[in-house]
Amino acid sequence: MALTQKKVDVALGQSAIPVGELAFAKDGRREHSTFAYDAAWLSNAASFAISPDLPLVGGNQFRKAPSKEDSAFHFAFADTEPDGWGCRVIARDHARRRKAAQQNGKPLPNAELSEMDYLLGVDDMSRIGAIRLLNPDTGAFLRVIEDGGRGTPPLLELAHLMAASRAVEMNKETEADLRYLRGRGTSVGGMRPKCTVVDEDGHLAIGKFPSVNDDRSVTRGEVLALHLAAAAGISVADSRIVMSEDTPVALIRRFDRVEGGSRIPYLSAGSMMQASRQEDHAYTQIADTIIANSVNPGQDLQELWRRLVFNLLITNVDDHVQNHGFLHVEHGQWRLAPAFDINPFPDKDQELKLWLDEAYGPVDSIKAVVSMAGYFRLDAATVQRILGEVCAAIGNWASVAMSAAVGMSGRDLEDFAPAFEHEQIRIARTLLK
């Protein structure tokens, strides 16, 4: 197979400060990338390492995926690649383009998409964090929208977005559906159908749609979990249910943008830890990362333990390291990003994906979580206070579920009850003195 090479310029933030150059090469099935900082960035007093595996040194820094689950790009760039749903849309769009070119006798696109193709398949407007990619020849931001239209549609187009996404889920999408969804995916959120949208006040958000395979109101469940988390004292992404033609859509505000559209550098916890996606990871490892990198480690450690308790007690069993993140503050110091992708799983046992520590294994016991609180630098009084606040918030789950903000029905309450009413929450209440 022919050698494929591509280079893009890398900039940071709304003002697009030049940071360096990213190069990608594919030779057969072997893929790798290199990144080199600009000399001006290295000499900038405000500079910082944009990725934990990219120290502030001159010259090319090489990256090859250590396993098939890992990325060929350094961690900060890997975080901006499309999620599972975005990859599905990109792959479908590519296959349809090849078929159309073949039918019209035009030159065929490459048969197989490279990892660089997926990285560039997220539009500049939607890319998470502050990293931006530019064409090195023209200096233009790499956009995916080809018709001059908006890279991010307004909230009033939710019905159109949902219909196109539903068509992709059912393998019935048209060329127009794919053209409409192209570039409008996200970098977080897994395989569920979703799209980046602009809220009514101009703020960037993610619209999450029901799946054709859902047997419960997953979108309402996520908004319920986020509202309960806020009541439990956890910093969370703002969320609400928006109805689109009688269908509940979860609208989650992007926390990596601020007023005026400024962008905040973001790293997932997995990237901050330089963790392989092939391995298991633990909350204590995230705690170690906080101690090493947080601008306020005491506050973030307490927040992380609070989230650990909450995740166990609402049966959020999809709490992997990509579902925790950090936002840059200044001078290479970071803070925990607001919690996101919190979902109750009423059909699962209370055993989290993340381990408590390497010795204990997956989190499955509130007593074990409490016994480990010292690792998070918490004293007994703080443990009691946090546990009480989380239990009180979860105890009110049915009222919050039926509130106007969530809008669950009686049937929804029956569906979700096992996620909130179980043995571990009962044990947690016995631990309160």
Image (cartoon, rainbow, N blue to C red):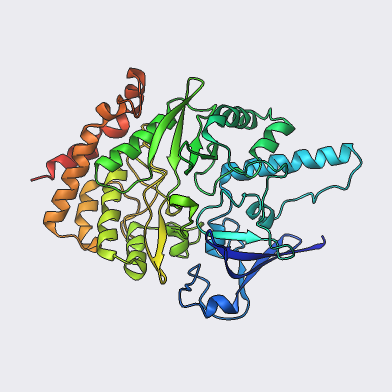
Q: How many marks?
A: 0
Q: Is residue 198 left or right of residue 351?
A: right
Q: Nearer the viewer, residue 270 or 68?
A: 270
Q: Position of residue 278 (x, y in %)?
A: 51, 57
From where the camera sits, is residue 71 visible?
Answer: no
Q: Position of residue 357 (x, y in %)?
A: 32, 59
Q: Quadrant of the N terminus?
A: bottom right
Quarter of the view holding residue 170: top right
Q: Position of residue 249 (x, y in %)?
A: 47, 30
Residue that appears at 55% across and 55% down: 80
The answer to whether 153 is drawn above or below residue 33 in the figure is above
Residue that appears at 47% across and 44% down: 203
Q: Is residue 182 left or right of residue 372?
A: right
Q: Nearer the viewer, residue 127 or 223?
A: 127
**Outermost residue toward the left?**
433
Residue that appears at 56% across and 27% down: 159
From where the camera sits, is residue 321 visible?
Answer: yes
Residue that appears at 32% across and 44% down: 311
Q: Position of residue 401 (x, y in %)?
A: 31, 28
Q: Nearer the viewer, residue 97 or 197?
A: 197
Q: Is residue 299 left or right of residue 255?
A: left
**Outermost residue toward the right?**
105
Q: Nearer the viewer, residue 288 or 202?
A: 202
